[in-house]
Image (cartoon, grey):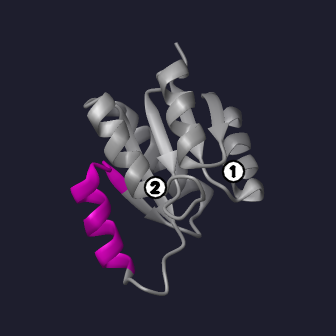
């Protein structure tokens, strides 16, 4: 059975690219363009893995991660982000872990690194 993955990112181009990569790799993929929409999609689809951006309208990534964790303790969560002018990448990733993310991946990343991280998360 194919693993179900939900991609939450407000950058439409990035969202589409990631979905295409995941579909080509054989995953069942759904997407949302903000945290609020992502949480609704999560409740409907119950994916095995959620990939979320940090900064989005409606509900930011850390809020979404916290709510996902309250809803489902077992879902795997990968935070991807290009960073913030207000926070160092290492601080952001530490915070993401505290909020419940299983892993973090800085943008930009290679397709190989991305797919390796997905596989690793789904196998744990």
Mark in the foreground, 2 or 1: 2
User: Where does the image place residue 94, in percent across and percent down from the top left?
Assistant: 26, 68
Left or right position of 57 against 49: right
Name which residue lies at 31% across and 77% down: 90
Q: Position of residue 22 (x, y in %)?
A: 64, 39
* Front residue of this view, candidates 117 and 16: 16
- CA separation in Å, label 2 and label 1: 14 Å
At horizontal 53% and vertical 65% (from top left) the residue drawn is 55
Q: Which residues are magenta?
A: 89-103
Seen at 54% across and 20% down, the residue is 45
Whether the residues at callouts 2 and 1 have beta carbons within 8 Å, the answer is no
- Disc 2 designates what residue? 61
Q: Which residue is mark 1?
A: 15
Disc on the earlier residue, 2 or 1: 1
When the figure is inspected, residue 81 is found, relative to residue 71, above or below; the finding is below
Q: Is residue 91 magenta-colored?
A: yes
Relative to 87, 15 lies left or right: right
Q: Secondary structure at mark 1?
A: helix
Task: Please indicate, yes or no, whether residue 54 appears anywhere in the rendered image.
Answer: yes
Q: Nearer the viewer, residue 114 or 30?
A: 30
């Amino acid at each position: 059975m194919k693993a179900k993955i939900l991609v939450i990112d407000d950058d439409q181009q990035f969202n589409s690219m990631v979905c295409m990569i995941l579909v080509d790799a054989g995953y069942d993929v759904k997407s949302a363009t903000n945290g609020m929409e992502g949480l609704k999609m999560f409740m409907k689809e119950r994916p095995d893995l959620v990939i979320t951006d940090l900064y989005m309208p409606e509900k930011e990534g850390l809020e979404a991660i916290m709510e996902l964790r309250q809803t489902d303790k077992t879902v795997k969560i990968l935070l991807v982000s290009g960073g913030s002018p207000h926070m160092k990448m290492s601080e952001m990733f530490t915070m993401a872990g505290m909020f419940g993310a299983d892993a973090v991946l800085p943008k930009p990343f290679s397709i190989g690194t991305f797919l390796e991280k997905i596989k690793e998360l789904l196998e744990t």
